[in-house]
Amino acid sequence: MAGFRQAKSVARLLSGGLAALFSAHVGLAQDVRPLPVAVAEILVVDETAITELYPGIAQSRRESRLGFEAGGRVAEVSVDVGDRVEEDDILATLDLRSLNAQIEAAEASLAEAEASLRLAQATAGRQGELVDRGVSSRQSLDEVRANLAVAEGRVAAANARLEELRVRRDLSSLIAPYAGVVTERYLDEGTIAAPGSPVLSIVEADAVEIRVGVPLARIDELTPDETYDFIVSGETVRARLRASTGVLERATQTVSAVFDVVSGDVTPGAIARLSLHAEVDGEGAWVPITALSEERRGLWNVLALTNPSGGAYQLEARVVDVVYTEAERAYVRGAVASGDLIVASGRARVVEGVRVTPAEPAEATSLAQSDDP
């Protein structure tokens, strides 16, 4: 009997404890306040303006690998990588001692041939006089004239040989074909340069072009000689359309267009993005990128604030279709209407069904309503 009373007392204590614990839990639940969240107000529009960016590569309009036509021992290379050169500057030269000796020999041969020609001319003149007086035969005159023709040919050949050697001497100096910057130096002094082997590389310094692949649907919007905006390292530069190939490239499904930079600093090799405006037809709304969460099968959703009972807001997932995205916002269509409030950021802290309260509606509203790229 005593054991029964003891067990009953323990049961009453446990029951009281559980009741107190349940009461405390209920009280705590009642004291939980709605979670403040940053929100954006939806503004549905009939159409919107967007800016599409098409990447391209900035490059020098001309780039040349310079070498000697004839080859020989390199006597001097007067420039190095990074040096700026002007048109017609001498950049490198070959050893000219052997060539100069050949030119002197050719000049001597020409002088000899010219002397022989003068003698042949004088002989032909005298022989003609003798024939006129009847003291010499026509056969002798023909032989003298043949010798004169041979002498004239020797002079022409000597002149051609001398001119060839002088051209080789000129080509033994590497001349800058245009103003530019040296980008590579392949040989140093004393090296035997093979004919045509590169000695230096230069790129044109002041003429930069941009090559861009433009979708076929938009290439007709571009007009030759018109200027367009490009984004390069966050800065806007202007470039004039020179030409487009008109040929659709299979790999990229784009048409190449070439632009000449007319304002702004662009370094060859930089990524330049062509900025083209377009209109997106059909209703939609701008929302912050941070308001989106990916669902299955490529769908997206936003969390809308609802309060059907008139009390605290609760979160409800709304499926949307992303039409266009930018760095900080996206244009969407779906189960949203003007005036709806959605969670603008902090999606990782909340889930559907949670009670929330708007924190900063004004800041997010301005982003959603802006149509400026």
Image (cartoon, rainbow, N blue to C red):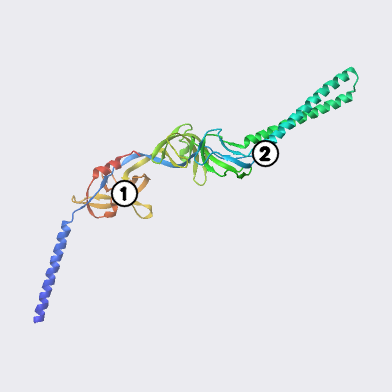
Could you say which is closer to the camera, residue 127 or residue 254? 127
**Mark 1 or 2, which is nearer the eye?**
2
Q: CA distance from mark 1 to mark 2?
A: 76 Å
Dot 1 or dot 2: first in sequence order is: 2
Label 1: few (<14), some (14–19) or many (≥20) C-alpha neighbours in 10 Å: some
Q: Is residue 287 visible?
A: yes
The quadrant of the image that shows the N terminus is bottom left
The quadrant of the image that shows the C terminus is top left
Is disc 2 placed on a helix, strand or loop? helix
Q: Which residue carries the number 1 mark?
A: 290
Is disc 1 placed on a helix, strand or loop? helix
- Dividing the picture into quadrants, the one containing residue 88 is top right
**Given contact means CB atoms under 8 Å apart, are the residues at marks 1 and 2 in contact?**
no
Q: Is residue 278 visible?
A: no
Count numbered badges in the picture. 2
What's the amino acid at mark 1? Thr
Q: Residue furthest top?
A: 133
Residue drawn at (31%, 45%), measured in percent from left and top? 287
Where residue 275 sits in the image (x, y, percent)?
41, 38
Where residue 28 sits in the image (x, y, percent)?
16, 59
Could you say which is closer to the camera, residue 37 or residue 194? 194
Could you say which is closer to the camera, residue 339 or residue 234? 234
What's the amino acid at mark 2? Ser
Where residue 257 sits in the image (x, y, percent)?
49, 38
- Image position of 283 (left or right of 182): left
Q: Which residue carries the number 2 mark?
A: 98
Location of residue 132 with respect to 157 vertically, above or below = above
Where residue 181 sits in the image (x, y, percent)?
50, 38
Return the mark for residue 139. none
